[in-house]
Image (cartoon, rainbow, N blue to C red):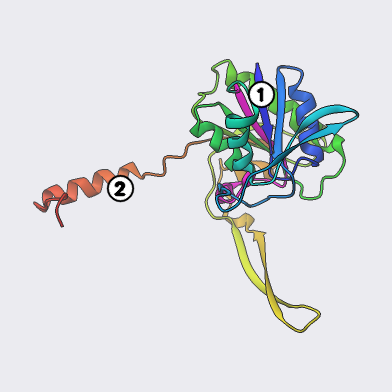
Amino acid sequence: MDILITNDDGIESPGIAVLSRELGRIGDVTVVAPASQKSASGHSLTIDSPIRYTEVFRDGRLFGYAVEGTPVDCVKTALNVISARKPDLIVSGINMGANLGWNVFYSGTVSAASEGVLKGIPSIAVSLDKFKAEKEEEFYFAAEFACRTAGELLSGCIPGDVLVNINVPAIPRAEIKGVKYTFQSGVAFNEAMKKQTDSSGKDYYCLYSKEDEDRFEEGSDCKAVREGYISVTPLRFDLTDYKVLASMEKDLTAAGRDKHLF
């Protein structure tokens, strides 16, 4: 089995190293990740400059390929240039920081995995709910759970045309209460742009966000992680609201309007 691993924290992230070792137990792993930090890059592409990549070695062995671009650039480069065969699975992570609720739209981690789904490849995004994880052992359990989910996805227990978004609480393994299969929550964050002043006296702004736990819905990904459960959310990327679409069609027909001519 061929597995492509990527992320948005960069190829030097400890999370991708742990994930590579764990998934290497069940398949042949290829690591293709950004050369530098690309968090919150969403589904962006590089179209105004060349995309380059270099080999990265660790302990005298090829570890992977560092791409000068976004996480989605990494997947496209892997599929079109680096890999001789289409992978059986794409796993993106392990991200530092959870990707919950509407934050998945901003996430480079989730977007890299969604690129796999768009290409017909079963894909997983996995994140650890901790922004400053630096030691590899902090990622061990998340990597093990991702490996287990990979087996379920490839065995057909989970449909291969959805993105499996995993978020793991950053608490000791013994304190994790279990697994919850969740829906993507809505807006559960309060945001503010705070003004700062640099050394030359010029103003600039930084974005800050804070979770609003009062808005966490029962059964949602945010609620599950905050209660100490691993959240597993199946995501699709057809954004059409079919209920509203049907209503619009019905209203136009009832009004005798020709919906093809305006």
Write the residue at 64% across / 44% down: 51
Other-residue count near label 2 (Cα within 10 Å), few / some / many at <14 / 14–19 / ≥20:
few
Q: Is residue 84 on the magenta stretch?
A: no
In the rendered image, which residue does mark 1 sit on?
Answer: 3
Write the residue at 91% across / 29% down: 59
Amino acid type at circle 1 is Ile
Q: Is residue 93 on the magenta stretch?
A: yes
Quarter that holds the N terminus: top right
In the rendered image, which residue does mark 2 sit on?
Answer: 244
Segment tinted magenta in the rendering: 87-108
Name the quadrant containing residue 71. top right
Asked if residue 95 shows in the view, the reply is yes
Q: Locate residue 203, reporting x and y percent.
A: 70, 80
Q: Nearer the viewer, residue 63 or 224?
A: 63
> In the drawing, does residue 215 fall left or right of residue 10?
left
Quarter that holds the C terminus: bottom left
- Local secondary structure at mark 2: helix
Q: Locate residue 80, reporting x and y percent.
A: 57, 31
Q: Residue furthest left?
A: 256
Q: Nearer the viewer, residue 25 or 176?
A: 25
Amino acid type at circle 2 is Val
- Label 1 and label 2: CA atoms lie apart by 39 Å
- Local secondary structure at mark 1: strand
Asked if residue 232 shows in the view, the reply is no
Q: Locate residue 204, reporting x and y percent.
A: 69, 75
> In the drawing, does residue 186 fall left or right of residue 192?
left
- Where 215 falls versus 249 (above or below)? below
> In the drawing, does residue 110 fall left or right of residue 249?
right
